[in-house]
Amino acid sequence: MTAMTATPSGPRPLLNRRLAEFGTTIFAEMSALAVSTGSINLGQGFPDTDGPEQIREAAVRALRDGRGNQYPPGPGVPELRTAIAGHQQRRYGIGLDPDREVLVTAGATEAIAAALLALVEPGDEVVALEPYYDSYAACIAMAGGTRVPVTLRPHDGAFRLDLDELRAAITPRTRLLLINTPHNPTGTVLARAELTAIAELAIERDLLVVTDEVYEHLTFDAAEHVPLATLPGMRERTVTIGSSGKTFSFTGWKVGWVTAAPDLVTAVRSAKQFLTYVSAGPFQYAIAEALALPDAYFDGFRADMTAKRDLLAAGLADAGFGVFRPQGTYFITTDIRPLGFDDGFAFCRALPERCGVVAIPNAVFYDDRQAGAPFVRFAFCKRLPVLEEAVSRLKGIAP
Ligand SMILES: *Cc1c(COP(=O)(O)O)cnc(C)c1O
């Protein structure tokens, strides 16, 4: 194959310039290392047990009944759009028209891509909280935008947003703020006061806001998830992204959604229709049922994940890690400096051999790699015996 074209400066790379910096993700490297060393993989965030049996059965029923086996409607099946609107109304008091203000996507990942591709012009700046979920940077780049990270910094045992830094990051070229709460990888849940300040800034500078709220049901202790769209003046400028993957422990189904004012949904749909056109049919019917589960499901899920967080957080602290106890998500960010290390990359590459556990260096989620260097992320969405075994293996880490 002669895919490379010779130029005076050498062969032209296959991967275009927008994506060149992204290469393969650390998750591939670390998951391969987990397999080759027989390690417990606390790197990538997916549960090791499936969600509710009745929802699995609902998917089987839809498939057998021939619902969704052929192209479903582009915006999503009406049953799911109605269920999403019902969920937002019940939980947050947000009233949505299922026909004009809800769009079903192939997971939150497609929702993020479609929102950025639809709303960002080449040259626009997108302000995102750093460390950021890895697809944000790639999607901003694919849209031709420039990412402007605002770093969450450790403060009293948690990563917090410095509102002055956020304000300083906004320029006349800023088009939108990309927010994520509860926040992966730090476990920070932005407080109402922080969200209010973000909202005031967005209104003052006339910015759009895309908010990734896929962990909305995973908040712990007294932390409360506040959707940005519920704050005054935000309804008409906010694109809210949700997903069934994390909430119902079916990450492989890839059913996500966008909720926003009609003109924003129309814009995002314009991009989505040429990405996947439609999203997996039978699973949409099953997730419609999942969203209507009684509160007991959501409470039970939160209690289960709280116990897992507590077990892993205590085990990591015992092993000598600095632990940022997460208020949300299913990740714990740790500081490896108390153990005598300061390079998360080297630490994570050696950890499988040393202890039989895989984790992710938070530096991969930073532009400012130095700021992220001493932090390492562990996922706790695994069965309790798996976490217990991981904790016992990690006891041997201290040099
Ligand atoms: C897992 C995750 C996603 C992706 O969600 P899917 O529905 O699986 O595409 C998006 N954002 C964050 C912050 C995540 O952790």
Image (cartoon, helix red, strand yellow):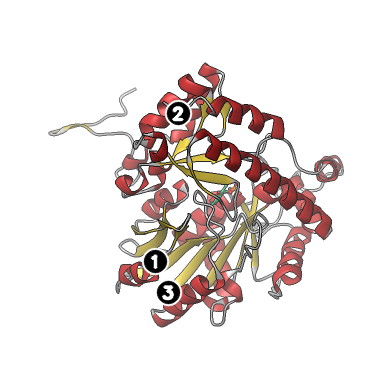
Q: Mark 1 points at which residue?
A: 162
Q: Which residue type carries mark 3?
A: Leu
Q: Residue 398 has which mark?
A: 2
- Element under label 2? loop
Q: Which residue is at a point 76% across and 46% down the rendered structure image?
A: 282
Number of other residues with Cα within 10 Å of mark 3, as a class: few under 14, some 14 to 19, many 20 or more = some
Percent coordinates x, y for residue 167 in the rendering: 35, 72
User: For residue 207, which numbered disc appears in the image?
Assistant: 3
The answer to whether residue 98 of the structure is visible from this angle is no
Residue 190 location in percent, x, y? 53, 64
Image: 56 above or below 118 = above
Q: Do the residues labelled 2 and 3 touch (CB within 8 Å)?
A: no
Q: Which of marks 2 and 3 is in front?
A: 2
| Extreme-left residue of the structure | 8
Q: Nearer the viewer, residue 250 or 330?
A: 330
Q: Earlier in the sequence, mark 2 or mark 1?
A: 1
Position in image of residue 249 (x %, y %) = 70, 44
Q: Is mark 1 on a helix, strand or loop?
A: loop
Q: Residue at x 70, y 45 (%)?
A: 307
- Distance, label 2 to label 3, CA atoms, is 47 Å
Q: Is residue 29 left or right of residue 298?
A: left
Judge by depth and name the residue closer to the eye, 99 or 361: 361
Residue 1, given in percent of the width and then of the height, sits at 34, 22
Mark positioned earlier in the residue sequence (3 or 1)? 1
In this view, 201 is above or below 219: below
Q: Which of marks 3 and 1 is in front?
A: 1
Amino acid carrying label 1: it is Asp
| Quarter of the rendering containing residue 79 | bottom right
